[in-house]
Amino acid sequence: MGYLIGIPLMALLAALQSTLMTQIHFLDGRPDLVLLAVVGWSLTGRSEEAMAFGLAGGLLLDLYSGLPLGFSAILLILIAYLISFAQGRFWESHILLPLGVMLIASGLYHAGGIGGVLLIGHPINFLAAATRVALPSTFLNLVLILPVAQLAAGISEAMASPQVTV
Amino acid sequence: VKRPQPRASLAFALILTAIGLMILNVAGFLQPVESLALRPLGAIQGWVSLRYAAVRDLLGSPNDITSLRGQNAELEAQVAQLQQQIVSLQEQVAEARILAALVNYAREQPDSSYLASKVIGRDVSPFLRSIWIGNGSDSGIERNMPVVTEQGLVGRVVEVFATASRIQLVTDPAAAVNVRLQTSRADGVLAAQLNGELSVDLIDQNKTVTPGELVLTSGLGGGFPADIPIGKVISVQKRDFAVFQQAVIQPSVDYANLEIVLVITNFRPIPVTTPSP
């Protein structure tokens, strides 16, 4: 069920990232919709689905980008996998703890993005990349993760019975 | 015996799939698949882009919205319908204006052949400055073709698929363009910052560069046709101890609001090969 909703949603989010999100920016940073969706879904405890969304969303993002195909997918799968390690351990105890998860995820995602740009031999000014892109994007992601996490939790509950880990 | 966690196996399998796809892509085997995938994705991108433009234009016309508030419910529905038509027509008029300007520009440059193409999206990576246009190899677009508007140089085609192409903007830090300053006849190389700021580097210290001078493509290196405007000089940085002087320029093209661009289809860039040692 999650896959039926998730994969088309990833296609829509990737298209929005390439069109609408290029107009909504703070300095040169933009909210990373696919990252928000993957992190939000990981926080519901559906880590296997989140990893699959990471693969689909990452591949779609790479199709709209000059980065090598599969690069964003690897980053998003890794982020979903890392979040799954702490699944059910601490963030349900405090509503603000998703912020910490998003901070790390966003940092990893943008560090990886810079790595991808270097991988294709593209020149990059690290200071400008960090201050004008990575930090503002992380700020926007932090602002959006709480409503996204709430929304994801609501959708997860509305869907079929939650997965049980034995 | 400790069995591997299914979650770790799934992550490993998915990452392996992504790496496999990346290798196949680097080797060029996925080009047809990407072209095929970009057909519906390009359509989605175009659809979202069109709807976004319509909503943006609707929100940007407060007078029309104010007048709608005064109507009763029945009239409101009718007016809303008419409003939708107006927005659509305004979009078409705006598009026609852009196309008319582009046609005038194309008429003034009879040596070049142009293909007008709609901008359907931008690179999702904030570290790369490129746009997507809704035409590709099916329309005769090839890699390295220059892209312009009536205002000046936009960039060059760096990736071509069947129905879409990626254009590297001149504001991308990797886009080195050889330029000439119109009045001083000084040559230089266009350098872009991550924030989109443009400057001309490697200008001879002996040349006198003045603010307001027009910056044009020089045609050196064979990457772009000569004499396409890029912008004008707004300030000059000349230091006695430096080998070259630098000029900060104001671009003539509004790269943030590109809607339709022209691809120069009959220009053949000269391939530059690195000499073997």
Image (cartoon, coloured by chain):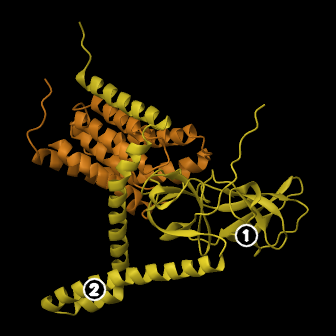
Q: How many marks?
A: 2
Choose between B245 and B88: the one closer to the eye: B88
- View extreme (right): residue: B206
Choose between A103 and A108: the one closer to the eye: A108
Which x, y percent locates residue A135? 48, 49
Whether residue B258 is visible:
no
Whether residue B22 is visible:
yes
Image side of residue A42 versus residue B100, left or right: left
Q: Which residue is mark 2?
A: B83
Q: Which chain is yellow?
A: B
Image side of residue B106 versus residue A157, left or right: right
* Location of residue B250 by image quarter: bottom right
* Label 2 chain ID: B
Q: Which residue is located at x 71 percent, y 61 percent?
A: B199
Which x, y percent locates residue B242? 86, 53
Q: Which chain is orange?
A: A
Q: Which residue is mark 1?
A: B227
Q: Secondary structure at mark 1?
A: loop
The kind of residue on which mark 1 rests is Asp
Choose between A2 and B169: the one closer to the eye: B169
Which x, y percent locates residue B216? 73, 68
In this view, A101 is above or below A138: above
Quadrant housing the N terminus of chain B: top left
* Label 1 chain ID: B
* Location of residue B74 by image quarter: bottom left
